[in-house]
Image: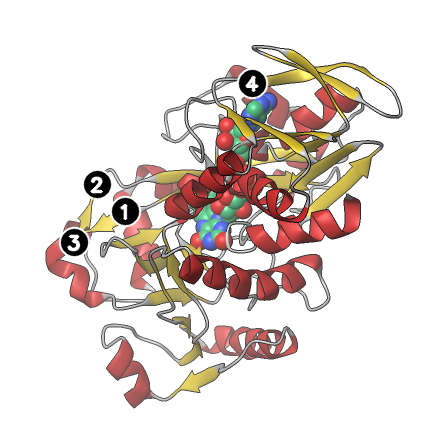
């Protein structure tokens, strides 16, 4: 029997565990999570959107896995009675300049195989989202919303019911020894030998890579916090579906958007603020180690030198409610500060940056001997988690 370790109990570690339990039922699977519960980081603090592959470079791994991924995720939700709703999304061009970018997105989406893409006329827009002001609007009917916490719960139960083990409060510290056949990893509570180790540690993927290989990671994770605000219940009616701006193609972030949540609420966000702590969910959170790590990385300095106005603008929106609201007014001009409830949620994105300072857009998965490392799995990593898991199993195991 093969011994397999998965490091990280976010949606990717769980999806890989779930798919492995189906495709390789004789494996002895052990999943290690450092916290006392699963899905506490990116996977439990995201927008809850099912993305279908509109934005991604045709031919990229992300485009392929997102398009397959949404179909697999919806089938999984149907089979397991998980709350989800394919409510559709609109992408809004707010000025003349954005019209060209929206047209490019529509072409990209069509090349990626999306179905039902359609530009809405003003009557159609008015019927769907009467509060939105737009120069041009693209409807993406395949997208929707889902309860990712429920998704993870179902995956975890499947792993356990198939004989796998999930250890919470058990951080993997690194490699004790290895040879061609096996890798002994040391965790907070034990030391065990495995035939295969899969690193899905999200915000720590680069550090886990180094602790398991003793090599410098080819990328560095720089944390970008995304903050949300709730829309007070009495103004919920201003948002019916998912309303997104045309994103700046320079960045992997989609821009502040309005989201109908699966619990019936409405949120606006997230911004993309450089965080001073990898798991820093408040704008006052600070880690000397994480900040030093970012500031001494030449990739980060190169990024900051080229993108300082973007970084400063996002930083301001973290401290000023009016700066945050100004971003959302672009889509719905009638929203006002008093309609937003303070103290919304936040998530921190694990964004890989290359030494040249490029934000790495595509998924990045590498194999080193008997170790597989998921080094970069940004949005839509939750939507695509099942297809990423299958891709890894088919190509690396
Ligand atoms: C603000 C925000 C909005 C997003 N919106 C969407 C969206 O709407 N739709 C979508 O599809 N995607 C979205 N994403 C992206 C998506 O959430 C991620 O791609 C996905 O959750 C990545 O999952 P993961 O398992 O790799 O990481 P994580 O969920 O971060 O899990 C990694 C886990 O590893 C654990 N860990 C780390 N180090 C160790 C160690 N040494 N030992 C043991 N455990 C360890 C951590 O505690 C954590 O539980 C969003 C992300 C963010 C942050």
In primary-sequence order, the first of circles 3 and 4 is 4
**Residue 278 in view here:** no
Element class at badge 4: loop
Check contact, mark 2 vs mark 1: CB within 8 A: yes
In primary-sequence order, the first of circles 1 and 4 is 4
Task: Point out which mark residue 171 bears.
Answer: 4
Element class at badge 1: strand
Q: As displayed, is residue 210 above or below residue 162?
A: above
**Residue 257 in view here:** yes
| Mark 4 within 8 Å of ligand 1, using the beta carbon | yes
Task: Point out which mark residue 372 bears.
Answer: none
Is 20 left, or right, of 75 in this rendering? right
Residue 373 appears at what percent x and percent y? 71, 36
| Mark-to-mark CA distance, 3 and 4 | 41 Å
Check contact, mark 3 vs mark 1: CB within 8 A: no
- Label 2: which residue? 342
Task: Point out which mark residue 229 bears.
Answer: 1
Q: For this rendering, which residue is in front, 36 or 162?
A: 162
Q: Residues within 10 Å of mark 4 (few under 14, many from 20)?
A: some
Q: As displayed, is residue 7 above or below residue 172?
A: below
Quarter of the picture holding the C terminus: top right
Is 62 left, or right, of 97 in this rendering? right
Residue at position x 67%, y 40% in the image: 374
Quadrant of the image occupied by residue 316:
top left
Q: For this rendering, which residue is in front, 13 or 284?
A: 13
Check contact, mark 2 vs mark 4: CB within 8 A: no
Q: Seen from this angle, which residue lies furthest left?
A: 234
Task: Point out which mark residue 339 bears.
Answer: 3
| Mark-to-mark CA distance, 2 and 4 | 34 Å
Quarter of the picture holding the N terminus: top right
| Mark-to-mark CA distance, 3 and 1 | 10 Å
Check contact, mark 1 vs mark 4: CB within 8 A: no
């Amino acid at each position: 029997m093969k011994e397999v370790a998965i490091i990280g109990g976010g949606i990717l570690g769980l999806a890989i565990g779930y798919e492995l339990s189906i495709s390789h039922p004789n494996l002895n699977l052990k999943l290690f999570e450092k916290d006392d519960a699963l899905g506490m980081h990116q996977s439990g603090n995201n927008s809850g959107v099912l993305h279908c592959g509109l934005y991604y470079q045709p031919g990229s791994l992300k485009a392929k896995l997102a398009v397959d991924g949404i179909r697999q995720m919806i089938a999984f939700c149907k089979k397991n009675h998980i709350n989800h709703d394919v409510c559709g999304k609109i992408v809004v061009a707010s000025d003349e300049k954005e019209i060209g970018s929206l047209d490019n997105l529509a072409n990209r989406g069509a090349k990626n195989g999306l179905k039902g893409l359609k530009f809405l006329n003003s009557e159609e827009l008015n019927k769907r989202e009467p509060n939105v002001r737009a120069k041009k609007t693209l409807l993406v009917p395949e997208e929707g919303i889902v309860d990712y916490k429920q998704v993870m719960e179902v995956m975890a139960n499947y792993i356990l019911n198939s004989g796998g083990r999930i250890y919470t409060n058990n951080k993997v510290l690194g490699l004790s020894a290895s040879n061609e056949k096996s890798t002994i990893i040391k965790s907070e509570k034990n030391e065990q030998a495995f035939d295969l180790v899969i690193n899905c540690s999200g915000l720590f993927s680069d550090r886990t890579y180094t602790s398991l290989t003793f090599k410098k990671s080819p990328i560095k994770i720089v944390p970008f916090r995304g903050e949300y605000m709730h829309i007070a219940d009495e103004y919920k009616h201003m948002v019916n579906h998912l309303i997104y701006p045309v994103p700046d193609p320079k960045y992997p972030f989609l821009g502040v958007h309005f989201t109908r949540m699966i619990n019936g609420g409405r949120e606006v966000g997230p911004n993309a603020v450089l965080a001073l702590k990898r798991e820093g969910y408040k704008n006052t959170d600070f880690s000397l180690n994480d900040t030093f790590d970012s500031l001494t990385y030449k990739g980060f300095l190169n990024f900051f030198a080229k993108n300082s106005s973007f970084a400063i603008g996002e930083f301001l929106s973290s401290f000023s409610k009016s700066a945050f609201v100004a971003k959302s007014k672009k889509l719905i001009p009638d929203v006002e500060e008093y309609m937003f409830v303070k103290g919304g949620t936040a998530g921190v994105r694990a964004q890989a940056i290359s030494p040249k300072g490029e934000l790495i857009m595509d998924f990045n998965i590498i194999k080193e001997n008997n170790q597989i490392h998921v080094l970069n799995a940004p949005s839509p990593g939750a939507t695509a988690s099942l297809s990423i898991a299958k891709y890894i199993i088919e190509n690396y195991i």
